[in-house]
């Protein structure tokens, strides 16, 4: 077995030099003599390492044929991850525990997880990691932290991973006490040059800076009427002597919009701010652009900014962390979503201009040859890295796609399944494939349809809260009134102007989105404000589509539980992973119902239009807690109203009173065996306990401690709302007609043992 770079190889075998056509971090893997001779040659050292991982991957998957001859090169040099870690050890939008890099304002003493992470990332050919939050803390770059950052870089280096940093734009003031952070001020320029020199002295291979400035309240060049290019070039000049890059984020918008103004639109921000700047960036600047114009939503059109910077290097930003997509508590295999953007053809100047060709520099052929992608990952100390075993397919797939955005998402997924679980059980392969491929469409179905985006709460980004999206300043309103819904982003809708966002696209794409008839159903409400009764291309009305999609999406989430249960005992699945995934799938199935009911009830409420199939508001198998006989419990009006069934929950009358709710089972519950489901609220700040009994015989107990123990890891809630709304199920509960069913809730901390409803479900029924 030979492993080395091409130069090393040709030096060692001068009489038989190789001439391989690869580039960048590419490599060649060849086996001969029935696999007895293995030759791994990298274009550089990284390539040799990637080749070794490729060999191991094929070996593990059983796909290493006896005579492999495989040569590959990356489609782009930038294959980075971004981690939004804070110096105190927390992670912005991270759902898997604390930082593997920082704690208490400094770099962790024990970096063994960092070494493991570097190895993991190298195996998927990621080559740089920005370790601190884009909402940067000036302390990160203080002199006393540089050595710690250097230790992280040292842990990365053997795996070909370079360290990147997010600078805090106003650091000249915060760190050096200068009176200004104006990017054109000579003292500011000197500050950044000195700081950069100091960093490179300790970390000579530092990848560069990732800059978030003049966005979401961050300081930036606009504070001094300077342009984004002037800001980017300030950093670019400082890192240039060291071969460093500046990733300048395109995610720029003003956080306050006026809802009364029908032309106000957050989606327009990036293109407006970059207007006139193409060609003004230094050649080591890369503009890093989120896939859609808003923010990692369940569905967005491709960001039009990709079509505005033909003379500038560009990179795509995706998010592996499922910030708006269930925070790793819901299964969502994301490559199909990312591909709606990377495969999208922007038709710039009437010629093929797929986003994947723009970011890999094929379309505009920028002389610096820079381009690629970055994924916000936010791994934590949790042993699964992301908090969920199945969510790791997204990280694996990101690496594979960053190497080649044309790779097939199903093949990638199946490679991941073989590498993660094994290759003995075809049923396991088929089941995880089916679940994963159905997961993003299901999530879209039970959250925000037709281009309304996710409709999560605008702060936690987890549970539903449509009314918060309608708040005055969000700039991405649903604009749902009693007759119609959607944001009109056309230039002229026939009777009046829209926000004009559609005009940010090249002509052909603009014409498609400007025209109501030509806009695809799945982006209809992104671009148009239409009556609920409008018929889609599918034939359904808008409102009925919402109802149907929500019922079908929640059903799919329920099916995932049964599908996963069918894997119990599989030769490729240990009990620990089986149970941990089952726990999350059961949670998802319950929370999908919270989503379904919240959105359909809210829509029914604003539109007044009933569901053709009579499902909305009709729950034959539910018993509302507030309708039970209460002792020590009292009704509680939930806000937002759609977060609870019948808008009402019950809470204990004080935080120390034990509550009891009981009911004699009504006639419709004939004697038999049911699945018991209880919807309660698991708030942060208390671990209430519950006990269900049938005729004084205990049938179920549990503790609402999933938020406090971090078992689920999603954004916490201290309220009775759609983030804390949780369902627990107990199969096989025997009841006889006329039995008395009781729940005793014992409050804890701030959590008053809240309950929403119970369902007694005949087998197979979801309600
Ligand atoms: C989103 C996210 C923030 C993050 C921002 C960004 O708005 O919710 O937490 O800081 O994106 O990408 O900069």
Image (spheres, rainbow, N blue to C red):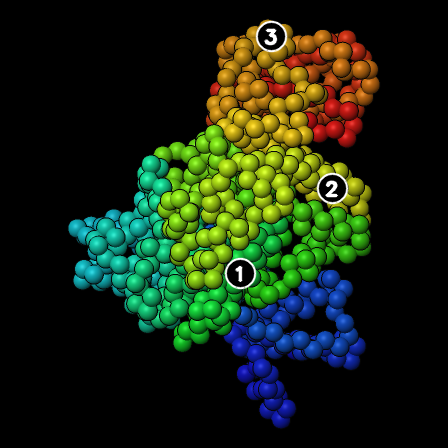
Q: Residue 259 versus residue 373: which sits nearer the camera?
A: 259
- Mark 3 nearby-residue class (10 Å; few <14, some 14–19, many ≥20): many
x 52%, y 46%: residue? 524
Q: Is residue 524 visible?
A: yes
Mark 2 vs mark 1, foreground winner is 1
| Quadrant of the snapshot with the C terminus | top right
- Say whether disc 2 or disc 1 marks the residue closer to the N-terminus: 1
Element on which disc 2 rests:
helix
Residue in the picture at 50% in, 49% down: 516
Q: Is residue 767 above or below residue 461?
A: above
Q: Which residue is mark 3?
A: 630
Instruction: Characterize the local packing of mark 2: few (<14), some (14-19) or many (20 or more) Cα atoms within 10 angstroms.
Output: some
Q: Earlier in the sequence, mark 1 or mark 3?
A: 1
**261 up-or-down from 366: above or below:** above
Q: Left or right: 385 with respect to 490? A: right
Task: Please determine whether, in this image, residue 662 is positioned above or below residue 259.
Answer: above
Query: Gap in Å between the C-alphas at discs 1 and 3?
Result: 57 Å
Q: CA distance from mark 3 to mark 2?
A: 38 Å
For this orientation, the residue located farthest to the right is 672
């Amino acid at each position: 077995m030979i492993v080395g770079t091409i130069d090393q190889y040709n030096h060692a075998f001068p009489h038989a030099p190789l001439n391989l056509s690869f580039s960048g971090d590419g490599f060649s893997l060849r086996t001969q003599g029935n696999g007895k001779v293995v030759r791994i040659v990298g274009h550089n050292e990284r390539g040799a390492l990637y080749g070794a991982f490729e060999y191991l991957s094929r070996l593990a998957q059983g796909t290493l044929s006896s005579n492999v001859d495989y040569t590959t090169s990356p489609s782009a040099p930038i294959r980075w991850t971004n981690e939004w870690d804070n110096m105190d050890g927390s992670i912005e939008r991270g759902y898997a525990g604390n930082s593997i890099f920082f704690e208490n304002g400094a770099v962790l003493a024990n970096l063994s997880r960092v070494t493991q992470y570097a190895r993991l990332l190298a195996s998927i050919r990621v080559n740089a990691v920005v370790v601190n939050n884009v909402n940067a803390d000036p302390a990160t770059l203080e002199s006393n932290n540089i050595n710690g950052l250097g230790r992280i870089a040292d842990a990365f280096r053997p795996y070909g991973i370079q360290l990147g940093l997010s600078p805090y734009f106003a650091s000249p003031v915060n760190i050096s006490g200068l009176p200004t952070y104006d990017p054109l001020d000579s003292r500011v320029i000197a500050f950044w040059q000195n700081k950069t020199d100091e960093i490179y002295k300790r970390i000579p291979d530092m990848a560069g800076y990732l800059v978030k400035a003049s966005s979401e309240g961050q300081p930036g060049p606009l504070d001094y009427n300077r342009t984004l290019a002037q800001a980017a070039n300030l950093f670019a000049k400082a890192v240039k002597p060291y071969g460093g890059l500046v990733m300048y984020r395109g995610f720029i918008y003003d956080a306050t919009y006026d809802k009364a103004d029908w032309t106000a639109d957050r989606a327009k921000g990036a293109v407006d701010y970059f207007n006139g700047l193409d060609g003004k960036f230094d050649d080591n600047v890369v503009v890093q652009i989120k896939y859609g114009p808003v923010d990692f939503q369940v569905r967005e059109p491709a960001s039009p900014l990709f079509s505005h910077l033909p003379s500038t290097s560009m990179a795509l930003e995706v998010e592996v962390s499922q910030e708006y997509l269930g925070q790793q508590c819901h299964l969502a295999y994301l490559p199909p979503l990312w591909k709606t953007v990377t495969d999208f053809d922007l038709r710039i100047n009437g010629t093929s201009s797929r986003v994947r060709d723009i970011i890999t520099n094929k379309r505009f052929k920028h002389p610096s040859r820079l381009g690629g992608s970055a994924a916000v990952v936010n791994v934590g100390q949790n042993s699964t890295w992301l908090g969920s075993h199945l969510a790791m397919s997204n990280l694996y797939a990101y690496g594979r796609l960053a190497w080649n955005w044309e790779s097939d998402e199903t093949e990638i997924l199946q490679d991941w399944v073989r590498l993660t679980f094994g290759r003995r059980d075809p049923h396991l392969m088929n089941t995880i494939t089916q679940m994963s491929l159905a997961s993003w469409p299901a999530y879209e179905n039970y959250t925000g349809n037709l281009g309304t985006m996710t409709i999560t709460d605008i702060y936690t980004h987890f549970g539903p809260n449509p009314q918060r999206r309608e708040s005055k300043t969000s700039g991405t309103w649903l604009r749902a009134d009693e007759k119609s819904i959607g944001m009109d982003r056309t230039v002229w809708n026939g009777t009046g102007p829209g926000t004009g966002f559609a005009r940010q696209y090249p002509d052909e794409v603009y014409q498609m989105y400007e025209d109501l008839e030509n806009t695809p159903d799945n982006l209809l409400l992104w671009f148009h404000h239409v009556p609920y009764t409008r018929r889609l291309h599918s034939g359904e009305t808008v409102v009925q589509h919402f109802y149907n999609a929500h019922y079908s999406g929640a059903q799919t989430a329920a099916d995932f539980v049964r599908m996963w249960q069918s894997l119990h005992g599989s030769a490729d699945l240990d009990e620990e992973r089986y149970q941990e995934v089952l726990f999350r799938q059961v949670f998802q199935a319950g929370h999908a119902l919270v989503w379904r009911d919240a959105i359909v009830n809210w829509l029914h409420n604003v539109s007044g239009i009933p569901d053709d199939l009579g499902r909305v508001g009709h729950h034959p198998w539910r018993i509302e807690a507030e309708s039970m006989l209460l002792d020590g419990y009292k009704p509680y009006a939930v806000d937002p109203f759609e977060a609870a069934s019948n808008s009402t929950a019950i809470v204990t009358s004080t935080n120390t009173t034990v509550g009891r709710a009981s009911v004699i089972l009504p006639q419709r519950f004939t004697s038999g065996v049911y699945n018991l489901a209880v919807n309660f609220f698991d708030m942060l700040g208390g671990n209430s306990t519950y006990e269900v009994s049938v005729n004084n015989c205990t049938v179920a107990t549990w503790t609402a401690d999933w938020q406090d123990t971090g078992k689920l890891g999603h954004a916490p809630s201290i309220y009775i709302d759609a983030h804390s709304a949780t369902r627990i199920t107990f199969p096989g509960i025997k009841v006889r007609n006329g039995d008395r069913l009781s729940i005793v809730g014992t409050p804890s901390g701030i959590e008053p043992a809240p309950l929403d409803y119970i369902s007694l479900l005949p087998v197979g029924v979801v309600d």
